[in-house]
Image: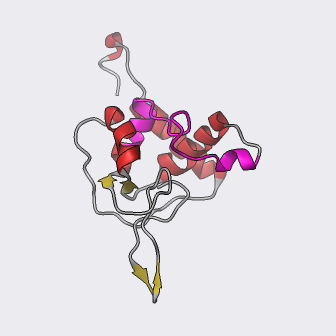
Amino acid sequence: MILNSPLQQENKGVINTVVCDICGAPGTGTLVSAEDMRKAVFKNGFNPFALGLAGQLHSAFGIDSSAAFEGWKNTIVAQDTSDWNICAKCMSKLRPYLEGKPRPTGVKKATVSANHLVGALAAKEAERKYKRKKRWQFWKK
C-alpha cells in the first residue's frame, strides 16, 4: 500500500476512493498480499519507480527515484501487513515478479510505523528473509 489509503469503502459517512497502491489509479484491481509484495520487491527486484509506475511526486521534493524506491521499500513494503490493491496496468508489470498466483489475506488495514528505527529493522529482516542463497548455502535459513 503505497502512500495512499488501504482498501476502504465507507467511513462515518465519508466515502473513500479505492486506488491502486502503486500508481494511485482509481478502482478496484487485483489484491496481492503484503507477503507476496515483499517477495516481489526484496527477493525478485520489483521496482515501480524504475518501471515508471509510481509517478513523479518524489521529484517535486528533490528526491531521485532510487532514493524514493529505497524509502518506499524499507518503510512501506517492509512493514505493511495489508493486502495491496493493484490496477491492471501495474499488475501487468508486477506479475513477472510474483511467485505464483496472488494470494490476498483479507487484511484491509495497513500497519506501518513512521518511526525510522522500526522501518530500518523491518527492512533488515525482509532483506535477510528474502536474500537469495547461493547453491552452496542450502543449509542456511
Magenta span contains residue 39: yes
In this view, the residue farthest toward the left is: 101
Rendered position, 110 above or below 22: below
Total number of numbered discs in the rendering? 0
The segment highlighted magenta reads 37-61
Determine the residue positioned at 30% across, 19% down. Answer: 139
Relative to 22, is 31 on the left or the right? left
Q: Is residue 141 inside the magenta stretch? A: no
> Which quadrant would residue 92 be assigned to in this image?
top left
Residue 27 placement: quadrant: bottom left
Residue 44 in picture, x, y percent from top left: 40, 29
Q: Farthest residue in the bottom direction?
A: 13
Q: Where is residue 23 shown, x and y percent of the image?
A: 50, 51
69 or 127: nearer the viewer = 69
Q: In this view, does 58 lie above or below 47?
A: below
Residue at figure coordinates x 59%, y 39% from the top left: 69
- At x 64%, y 42%, the residue is 68
Residue 115 image point, x, y percent: 64, 56
Q: In which quarter of the image is the C terminus?
A: top left
Percent x, y of residue 80: 46, 54
| Residue 77 falls left or right of residue 91 | right
Q: In this view, does 47 lie above or below 58?
A: above
Residue at 48% from the left image edge and 47% from the top image edge: 77
